[in-house]
Image (cartoon, helix red, strand yellow):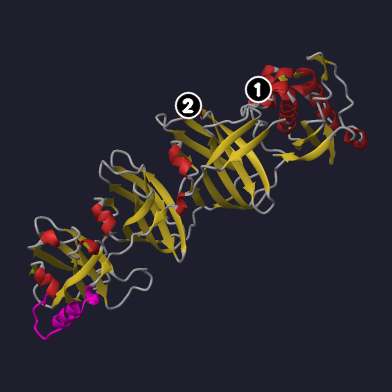
Amino acid sequence: MKKVIVLFVVAILLVGCQKEEEQPIDKSSDNPKEQEAVADIKSEVSAIQFSNYAEEVGFSLRTPSDSTINAQNTVQIQGEIENTAVLSDDEVWIVVTPESQIEELKHSEFNYYLPIKSGEFAKEISMHNGLGEYQVSIRLPGSEAEDEGSYVEAANFTVNNQSEDIQREVEYTKYGVEQELELIRPEQGLNELDQSIYVEGVVPKDYGGEMVLVQVEREGENRQVMLPVKDGLFTGDIPLYFGKGNHLVRIQLYNEEDGLYYDSAMFYARNQSESAFAEMEAYRTYTDRGITLQDPSWDTVNEWDELEYPIKGEIDPDTPGADEITHIIVMVNHVGEGEESGYLVPVENYQFEGNAYFRFGPGEYEVTVNVPSMEQHDQSMFYFESVVKVGHQVAHITDQRDLLPSRGIESDHPEIIQKAEEITAGIHGEREKAKAIYEFVAQHVAYDVEKAEKDIFDIGDSALTTLESGIGICQDYAFLATALLRAIGMEAHYVEGYAGERHAWVEVKTDGKWIEMDPTWGAGYIQDGTFHFNYNEDYFDPAPSFFAETHTREGIMY
């Protein structure tokens, strides 16, 4: 019997590979001369006053001109800088600070970064919190090389917004402006929706990443969604994971230099729905191996009340190693019990679709979707890598751990069901049915001596392949017997253990009692490297003491 080993070596969470963009440094108050300039700004003159630094670089404003102005939501800012050559950066930084904050929104200030083009900058800015007083600070890049990333205030003024309407924009960070990020949707920075928000955006053709990372936050919790970039465009529905209320959504772009994702734009989405979504974590292998999942998806609900769990997706055929992905391996873990079951979903023409199962009854589950590792080090084992992990709370189901299909045990396949019904036709007692299946498997399957001696393992080994080929080793006998028993509604499971070496056999529940059977040992014997059929019933429901002389049980593989 061969074991499956999970490789987590390259399964690096993107969750740890991000970084909030650091705000530029405001050096306005570091210089005594600048402090004097701030005092000048507060003079009784109604015109906007400029700091000494502003005058040094030839800063001027066309509009506005007064230090206190009235507005209906927006203010037009236009200005010039004569001596741009001395500036350490290419953007003007404008900070809009409301006198009063909207409690349910995380950020009170709003930041704009305006590109300086031919010495000019312009922007219509919004008073993002509605009615009230605002302070607007215009800041310029420092003039020395070591000042890169630092800003000095050039001017400020007061706005009395006379409109109660809240018109919040999408807020771009300095990094987002420099990377030429453009969000097409949403158009506003405060949106009311149900369950999810559609995001569409554009990045330059030379963008260094394959994905854009979207982080959704609310009350100290956060989740992440990766959107693939194709021809400079990214799109997708972003779940509002945390139920009813405001969610802060950050768009993060990849930085090739350090391999991190940086905040590039942000907006708010007010969810009107109480629904909560499943926690889904994608590993780096999700993109490296070219996987796209449709089921489960980022908007899969958290609470689940069905036994079946659909798995569906596709593989990018241009990704290195795409042709080596013949199966998707799904592991389902009941967190409370620590029990785990495995499922195989075949890949055909780079597409896959199948089911996993919540077989252990209600509770908390983790579902991990895996692909075969690029390197298979040992033919007696199978290595695979995790690409996605999803968490669910499962309720209103029954425990069917010994009845449902699983990896290698296709008890729901029509050929298996037909054969099981054929074998047990006319037989009424459960024990008699189990014995008929034991006899069929022992007499139908020839022991594969070469496979055993070379310790060869194939992830596709199963009850169905064994039924069709009529040849196998202990795991294949156990796969087929377990599948046939489950196919006629009898509880059965695959037992892992030792009988001189790694071995597998079957337990089945008959008339309310669990009994053991080993169709491999009931099939025949090996002599001079050749298998000889020699059916015997010694290993159908043997006496426990007799069985224990040769068999040592390790556990159950679901």
Part of the protein shown in magenta: 28-51
In the figure, is residue 63 to the left or right of 243? left
Q: Measuring 73% from the left and 21% from the top, which residue is drawn there?
A: 453
Say which element carries label 1.
helix
What residue did someone put label 1 on?
465
Picture layout, residue 233 above or below residue 409? below
The quarter holding residue 104 reads bottom left
Picture layout, residue 31 above or below residue 317? below
In the figure, is residue 446 to the left or right of 302? right
Q: Position of residue 507 (x, y in %)?
A: 80, 36
In the figure, is residue 445 to the left or right of 392? right
Neighbour tally class for label 2: few under 14, some 14-19, many 20 plus, Cα within 10 Å: some
- Amino acid carrying label 2: it is Asp
- Amino acid carrying label 1: it is Thr
In the figure, is residue 250 to the left or right of 520? left
What residue did someone put label 2 on?
323
Say which element carries label 2.
helix
Residue 122 can be seen in this image = no
Neighbour tally class for label 1: few under 14, some 14-19, many 20 plus, Cα within 10 Å: some
Q: Measuring 88% from the left and 36% from the top, which residue is drawn there?
A: 548
Residue 23 can be seen in this image = yes
Q: Is residue 517 magenta?
A: no
